[in-house]
Amino acid sequence: MTRMLRGAYVIARRDFGATVLSKAFLLFLIGPLFPVLFGGVFGSIGAHVAAESEKPVVAVVSSEPDFAALTAARAQLVGAIDDDDLVHLAHYAPERDVAAQAKRLLATRIPPIRSVLTGGLAAPHLTGPEGNSEAVAQLRVIIGNARSAGPPAALGITETQTSSGSLVKDRAITAQIGQMVLFVLSMLLCGMLLSQLIEEKSNKIIEIVAAAVPIDSLFVGKLFAMLAASIVGIIVWTSCGAAAIALLKTGGLSTLPTPAVGWPMFLLFVIVYFAMNYLLLGAAFLTIGAQASTVREVQTMSMPVTFSQVVIFGFAATAVGAPDSAKGIFAAVFPLSSPMVMLARAAQEPELWPHLLALCWQAIWVAVILRIGSHLFRKTVLKSGPRTKGWRFRRT
């Protein structure tokens, strides 16, 4: 056991240094940031353009007192309707030919005038295109409030705690987001293990390494080396995300429903279950990739492996909202979906003892998959070890 752990540490240190200190790893870290950056930039531009185009700007051709009354009436609606959804009023002093002025204002592009309100409060008249019923309804309310005397009646409000139905629904949202984070990270990072052994197998280095350390140490070391490299990548991406949240002044975690175990424990479970999910899927993918001989075979395996990840994620997502059902318990027991299901359970149920059992169960399966993978690698690739009666492993 000591020799196996020492050999695993040597392999892990070797692979981690070769991965993290390479130029390709820098591109690997920067790579996912470009789609997010461009998506955020173009998304914000598109949202800004859409918001500006949706703002109904109404040109008010009236006197100063009438426009002041309309502005005050509009301000009363800001508490009930978002300011961006309300009609925006722009004042223009009346000219001699009001009809010609309204026609000219409708042709104005900066600011884009949707409608023109003339006649003041005494005889209001709206001129504009059809299909603007929401703006018309808002203007009717604003004009009615501007004409009436005195403030509107106050509305008494009694605040209550969150209902149980809304609490379950909100926690299910947190569970789904946690599962999605685990799925995206695992799909992005576990695929590297498929081609982990191809280069060393093609250069005949794997035989030298296998002669120096046990095969189990080889698999364990490579798996934990890639886990450590993945954690480095996650730290970089999380730091960039936190910086972006601080820069954009968004609510961060406060905008999400609070999980049942609380945010500190839930974030700890995110880290622990990501490591277990990576170890489980990584051990399976490392076993599959060890059977390939060429890069073409690895590329052929990529599609079914990716599809299997999607299927596992869909299976785990069925347990959200019903963690104690037969389907939820079976998904939690199944090793490859267990980390995602248990993370969702942490968002919905406050008990902690099921997570201890789940982590022990998942650790056992990591050891089992690695043992099977090293046995297959020894039999099919290295062609060493005693023959197994009843079975004959042969590489096609």
Image (tube, grey):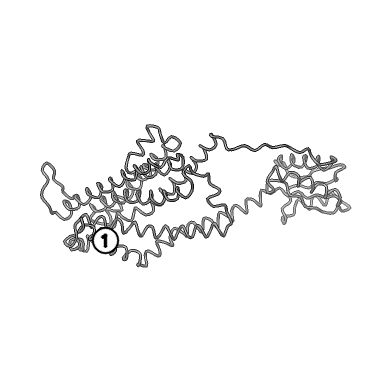
Residue 323 image-quadrant placement: top left
Asked whether, in this view, residue 11 is left or right of residue 235, the answer is: left
Q: Position of residue 274 (x, y in %)?
A: 38, 50
- In the depicted structure, whether residue 195 falls above or below residue 155: below
Q: Residue furthest top?
A: 326
- In the depicted structure, whether residue 225 falls above or below residue 318: below
Image quadrant in which the N terminus is located: bottom left
Closer-to-camera residue (74/360): 360
Give the residue type that dot 1 points to.
Tyr
Closer-to-camera residue (121/259): 259
Closer-to-camera residue (250/358): 358
Q: Position of residue 59 (x, y in %)?
A: 78, 50
> Which residue is tagged 1?
9
Q: Position of residue 223 (x, y in %)?
A: 29, 55
| Residue in the picture at 82% in, 43% down | 146
Q: Position of residue 132 (x, y in %)?
A: 71, 42
Closer-to-camera residue (261/332): 261
Q: Residue furthest right?
A: 96
- In the depicted structure, whether residue 133 falls above or below residue 185: above
